Amino acid sequence: MNSGLYRSAHATPDGEPPRAEDGVTLISVDPPGTVPPGDPSADGGSTAGNSAIMALGSLVSRIIGFVRNALIGITLGAGIGDAYTSAQFLPGQIYELLLGGILSSVLIPLLVRRRKADPDGGEDYTRKLLTFAFVSLGVATALVVLAAPLITAIQAGDENTKAYKDLVTSFAWLILPIIFFTGVSALIGAVLNVRGHFAAPTWAPILNNLVVIAVCGVFIAVFGTTDGLKPEDMTPGRIGLIAGGTLLGMVAQAIGLLPALRKVGFRWKWRWDPRGLGMGEIGRLAGWMLCYVAANQLAVFVVVRILNRVAGKDSASVLAFNNVFLLTMMAHGIIGVSVMTALLPKMSAAAAEGRFAEVSADLSRGIRLVSAALAPIAVVYGVLAAPIAVTLFQGGAFKNSDALATGQVLSVAAFAVLPLSISYLCTYTFYSLQGNKTAALINLPVVAIRIGAYVVLAAVLDASLSAAGMTAGNAISYVASALISLAVLRRQIGRLNLGSVGVSLVKVLVAAAIAAALGLLVVHFLPGAGSPSGRGEALIQIFVGGAVILLAYLGAALALRIGEVTQVIGMVRRKLGR
């Protein structure tokens, strides 16, 4: 779901990286001859080719997504924007409990196996699954909407005014039905991915973003911004337009996927047959995933409740935290998810046939690739956090002080980028092995660490640093997740080539440190000196500082002979020479 809200630690957005045929291969996860005959991943071409399609779509979608989020901030400001964002958390949390983790860990591997084993390529089974899922999502969504006042009262906390809590509830009435359409969109996307079609699920969120952008434009044209308004000043018309437009965006995203189903030859028909789905197998796998997701959503509940304490009090709160999380997920989505989305069918097939050496090789290769590609992005986030936040979010009801506070949170998030993607890679490896129980058990101490970090940091930090502290809590838990997962995977599938991975990571961190030092030095002498007052100063810092960081990283990577970076540069040179 690309609807602009914080997701749990392993809730997956869309997105992928550059391709081999363009000479910019960050992902050579399929060396020639390594895709076995009959592998489901072969339906859609190589991993690099599929990743390329998803990369471009993700990049465009996320750029438009930040235009959307900037407009939401400009339109609603920090105070009312916090209430809107709190309401937006709810469908994401509930969707994850109902389907999110189960989709990637249970249903996609199951659909891959049925597509390979069934005489009709899993067509009838897929119809039964979609019918059952649509009915279940519809019933669950209706019940959640009815319970909206109770849910929002718990999440908003006791520290906020009644007007603020009522506003969150009013937003939630119209935003919560997103659960159903998010589920429909995700299920259709899964069917397409299993059939080797990656483009539509990656590009469809653009429709969502464009609808919300248009709604923000209409809101400003009709009502102006909410600058100076308090929660009690929000009229039913204002609430209906912005919340109803948010729902309409997800409806458009789901509808936009339907033509792609016909393109891959899938014809959906109503097939109500829960017994024919093998609910026992699904239930056993999904039960552990439900435990996994429930733990994550408990952490989401805690962080939103903590941040709501400072909402509307001139501190970075829910809206700022969410905007920064989206920036973190953008980096992860464009690079990390590309590897995972393209590898999951391939790894699932290899695991099903007992080819664990291939699973291990894909995991270690994926870690090296995402680390080398994400390191300069993390440095840019850390060094240029303030100018990035000013450029993306300042304007209208979202003032310079709000943007600088958001930048402070982003500088902390820079340390979460790499461990986030590495922990995702490990979790997807468990999914391919059908190790949902293992993933769920690992997640329990990880979530305990995350919640513990939230509580401790909220207690020791000043209220103005609450959002930064919660972001640091996320980073700490991602590191713990990666370390625990790698230790368990090594015991389950054998040697992970951790020695070569460790050497590669050390080289990447050294190159990143050199780039960060030079970037900080240059930005210190630029107008605004890291705290720009407007977009002019911010853009100068981004262009000059960003260029220095990227060039320094590439230079250091070449000097240190980081294989993944030198491979990409060599391919670019050959392309230009040809």
Image (cartoon, grey):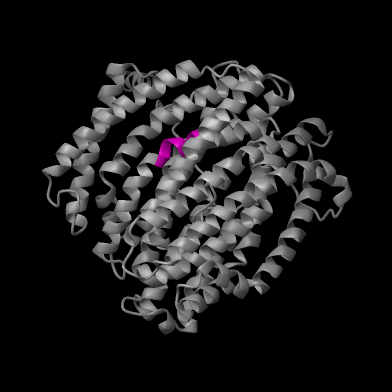
Q: Which residues are magenta?
A: 416-422
Residue 421 within the magenta-colored segment of the rendering? yes
> Image quarter for residue 561?
top left
Give whichever of 210, 228 is nearer the camera. 228
What is the x, y in percent for residue 411? 31, 46
Q: Main secondary structure of the magenta part?
A: helix
* Quadrant containing the C terminus in the rendered view: top left
Examine the rendered structure and indicate whether residue 160 appears above or below residue 23. below
> Image quarter for residue 317?
bottom left
Examine the rendered structure and indicate whether residue 25 appears above or below residue 6. above
547 with respect to 40 (left or right): left
What is the x, y in percent for residue 145? 65, 71
Residue 513 within the magenta-colored segment of the rendering? no
> Image quarter for residue 247?
bottom right
Give whichever of 201, 113 is nearer the camera. 113
Any part of residue 338 in sight: no
